[in-house]
Image (cartoon, rainbow, N blue to C red):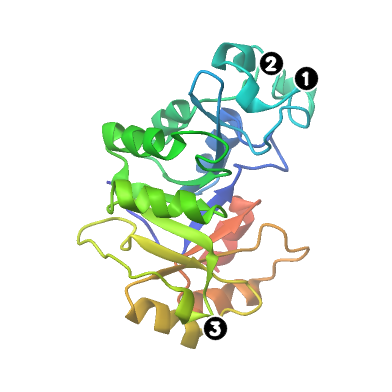
Amino acid sequence: MVKQACPWVIAHRGVPHEAPENTLVSFEWAIQQGANWIELDIHQTADEQLVVIHDETVDRTTNGTGAVRDKTLHELQVLDAGSWMDARFQNERIPTLADVLALTEGRAGVVIEVKAGSSRYPGIEQRLVQMLQRARRLDDTVVISADREAIVTIRQLDSRVATLSFHEKLLSPETWSPPVTREGNSSRYTHFLFGDVVAIDERSIKRAHDAGIGVLTSVAFEKVVTADLVVRLVRAGVDGVFTNRPAALKEMLRS
């Protein structure tokens, strides 16, 4: 079980300003910089393998073209997923989810964003849940998605999987689903809400915590992240913060 400090430093796609996003080198560098959680995105291949890449196509982050779901795992893993950023990364490949689970085991938790559920990738929820069960990663994984049905399906498959649906808003308790807490879990909750960094306050987070629900937020796309902002989030009691710069966030948390 991964011991977690609060708030979690969640490395958004690794360290995307320093290494190609959603690659093993990016995740490794994030862990070395003090991230205790890694955020990644998954899609499903033509031969029903779960791979880590943000977009539904390979065009932006590899030297290939076309939709992930139209390619086999082998076809994806011969692509260069690093040179688009810098020639130093020319040997980087699109990792599988299994690769990332192996890299992070005992070192960092994982926040897995399901970019689309069974409406686009038939059976992806079941494959994901089975992989987490086999890898014994239920205690340090949170599955998130903007696909409401994908989250519902995952909760039905195994209520122990911690989840977050972007359709459920921190400041709108009427949208919250009934939470299920579990003792001894490193993530403390099986249910999370996402709160806009501007709107988060101590009162709203306390209301969520009192209901047995954790709260995550993000500074990944903020132009300026100040120490004052980080202090406010800590005082409010947020459970985790997504960041593109884990070393900088870690340093602010120490001060």
**Rendered location of residue 47, percent (x, y):** 51, 18
Single out the residue that lies furthest toward the left.
183
Does residue 6 show up?
no
Q: Quadrant of residue 239?
A: bottom left
Between circles 3 and 2, the one closer to the viewer is: 2
Distance between mark 1 and mark 3 Cα atoms? 44 Å
Circle 1 crowding by C-alpha within 10 Å: few under 14, some 14–19, many from 20: some
In the picture, measured across the screen, residue 36 lies left or right of residue 70, that is: left
> Above or below — where is 83 with respect to 191?
above
Circle 2 crowding by C-alpha within 10 Å: few under 14, some 14–19, many from 20: some
Q: Residue at x 63, y 72 (%)?
A: 197
Q: Are marks 1 and 3 in contact (CB under 8 Å)?
A: no
Three-letter residue code for mark 1: Asn
Image quadrant containing the C terminus:
bottom right
In the picture, measured across the screen, residue 127 lies left or right of residue 13, that is: left
Distance between mark 2 and mark 1 Cα atoms? 6 Å
Distance between mark 3 and mark 2 Cα atoms? 44 Å
Q: Dot 3 corresponds to which residue?
A: 201
Q: Dot 1 corresponds to which residue?
A: 63
Q: Residue at x 78, y 20 (%)?
A: 87
Q: Residue at x 70, y 22 (%)?
A: 89
Three-letter residue code for mark 2: Leu
**Rendered location of residue 237, percent (x, y):** 45, 76
Q: Dot 2 corresponds to which residue?
A: 79
